[in-house]
Amino acid sequence: MPPVQFTRESPAVGRITFSNPPVGLVTGRAVRDLIDIVQNLASDDELKVLVFDSADEDFFLNHFDLAHLDEFPGGPAWMDLVVSLSQAPYVTVALIRGRTRGGGNELALALDLRYASRERALFGQPEVGTALVPGGGGTERLPRQIGRDRALEVVLTSADYDAETAERWGWVTRTLNDEMLDDYVAGVVERLASFDRTALATAKAMVNRSALPSEAELESAYKTFQALTASPSFRARAASNDVPALTEEQLVASERDLGEFIGAAARKRAAAEASAASH
């Protein structure tokens, strides 16, 4: 199965499904595939609703594959993608199970409606813990969704947040018990698909006027992220946490609890530096 798959469920409804085992990373190929799909849909006059889900119940869409950033499309490709989705004349709906972090969380934030499994969804922006900053819109969209202080906590601590916290803070539209999630989202999609396309698109555009970050803000964030990937601090951490050196079992274990893993690694690094300085 390709990392991004598009299926047409009806003239009015499409679905994008993510699948990139074992830990759902955002890869260069996934970004290119998403861009191609969204560009093809730009001329579609029938689509009213586009649903995003994952074939993996443990990972909706994870962070960027930091070990292979050279494989990502150059220029403002990611910014153009998330802006296109936010401004699209159809309604975008995320059905979220599993970990949703970094670039995956930033893509989810760019969508219109986010419905999450109360038991299985988890959210985070882990970049600062790896000596980077969010570059895909997290620092621009999260403050608008959850407020400045909560956004600062999320970004600065690089911790994971459960679905109930995300709902309470306004990070997601709604959480539901896992066994109810699919039926609920199907009902929302069916309802939206029955409405007039022009009315849906116009109402979305009107709300967007006061709710979205500017393209200049998003572009600046991505350039800052790119610049920090060349920093000595990031390179040192990437070398000490060499992903290819991990077994698949170790990789999955670290990604399941990435917030805790990042915190433990930082404490270990700080202790080693303090010990070296004292000798």
Image (cartoon, grey):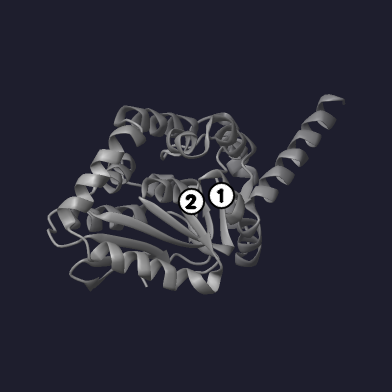
| Mark 1 crowd level (few <14, some 14–19, many ≥20, 10 Å Cα) | many
Residue 131 horizontal/vertical position (percent): 58, 34
Instruction: Determine the secondary structure under disc 1.
Output: helix
The numbered dot on residue 212 is: none
Residue 17 horizontal/vertical position (percent): 37, 66
Quadrant assignment, res 276: top right
Residue 118 horizontal/vertical position (percent): 58, 62
Quadrant assignment, res 130: top right
| Mark 2 crowd level (few <14, some 14–19, many ≥20, 10 Å Cα) | many
Q: Is residue 69 above or below residue 53?
A: above
Task: Judge left or right: residue 26 versus residue 82.
Answer: right
Residue under pointer 2: 172
In-front residue for pair 243/178: 178
Q: Looking at numbered disc 1 in the image, what kind of residue is underneath it?
A: Ala
Q: State the residue at coordinates (59%, 36%).
A: 150
Quadrant assignment, res 75: top left
Residue under pointer 1: 166
Q: Work out whether residue 22 can be spotted.
A: yes
Badge 1 vs badge 2, beta-carbon distance below 8 Å: yes
In-front residue for pair 121/222: 121
Task: Judge left or right: residue 58 versus residue 113.
Answer: right
Q: Work out which quarter of the rendered image holds the C terminus and state it.
A: top right
Q: Work out whether residue 89 can be spotted.
A: no
Q: Work out which quarter of the rendered image holds the N terminus and state it.
A: bottom left
